[in-house]
Image (cartoon, rainbow, N blue to C red):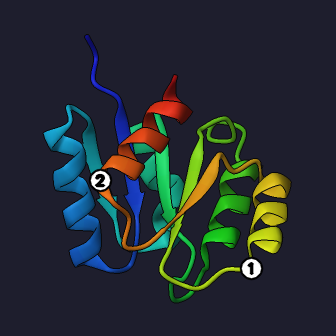
């Protein structure tokens, strides 16, 4: 069975490293990207099955990165799950997710069980 590859895009290296270890312990291939400006290059190189994308990052926020991904024909079908430690207004976040074709969002710190459940739901 081929393992699913997940691209973690988060400027907080320590957080991304913890998520990477959790995913690898659950038979996923996990790749980290800490500079969101490199997203399209990373997608072409890694060909991920799913992207876990932080919302609050310097230079480009997660919504801008998601929009960039959706505009690229080769990457536009990759599911995206947003992650954030920022308090969000649920209705506004939901609207943005729908507008950008986002599969969902999770609040940081995310519990392993919740993260793995969302990944399984999205990758089914």
Residue plotted at (38% across, 57% down)? 8
- Give the crowd class for mark 2: few <14, some 14-19, many >=20 residues within 10 Å: few
Q: In which quadrant will I find the N terminus?
A: top left
Of residue 73 and residue 57, the one placed in the foreground of this image is 57
Residue sitting at 20 percent across and 64 percent down? Answer: 18
Q: Position of residue 45 (x, y in %)?
A: 39, 43
Residue designated by label 1: 89
Of 55 and 105, nearer the camera is 105
Residue drawn at 16 percent across, 53 percent down: 21
Mark 1: which secondary structure? loop
Give percent across and percent down for residue 120: 44, 32
* Separation (CA) of disc 2 from disc 1: 23 Å
Say if residue 48 shows up in the picture.
no
Which residue is located at x 54 percent, y 54 percent?
40
Q: 85 above or below 121?
A: below
Query: Which badge, 2 or 1, comes first in the chain's sequence?
Result: 1
**Total number of numbered labels?**
2
Q: Is residue 68 above or below residue 63?
A: above
| Quarter occupied by residue 28 | top left
- Residue 124 percent location from the top left of the image: 52, 22
Disc 2 element: helix
Q: What mark, if any, has residue 106 been given in the picture?
A: none
**Image-based side of 116 in relation to 62, left or right:** left
Quarter occupied by residue 65: bottom right
Would residue 8 appear left or right of 59 to someone viewing this image?
left
- Pointer 2 residue: 112
Q: Position of residue 123 (x, y in %)?
A: 50, 29
């Amino acid at each position: 069975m081929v393992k699913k590859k997940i691209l973690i895009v988060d400027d907080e290296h320590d957080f991304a490293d913890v998520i990477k270890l959790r995913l690898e312990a659950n038979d996923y291939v996990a790749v980290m990207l800490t500079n969101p400006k490199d997203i399209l290059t990373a997608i072409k190189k890694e060909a991920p099955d799913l992207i876990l994308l932080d919302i609050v990052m310097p230079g480009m926020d997660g919504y801008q990165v998601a929009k960039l991904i959706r505009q690229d024909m080769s990457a536009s079908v990759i599911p995206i799950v947003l992650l954030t430690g920022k308090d969000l207004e649920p209705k506004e976040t939901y609207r943005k997710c729908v507008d950008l074709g986002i599969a969902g969002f999770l609040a940081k710190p995310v519990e392993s069980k919740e993260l793995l459940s969302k990944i399984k739901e999205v990758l089914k």
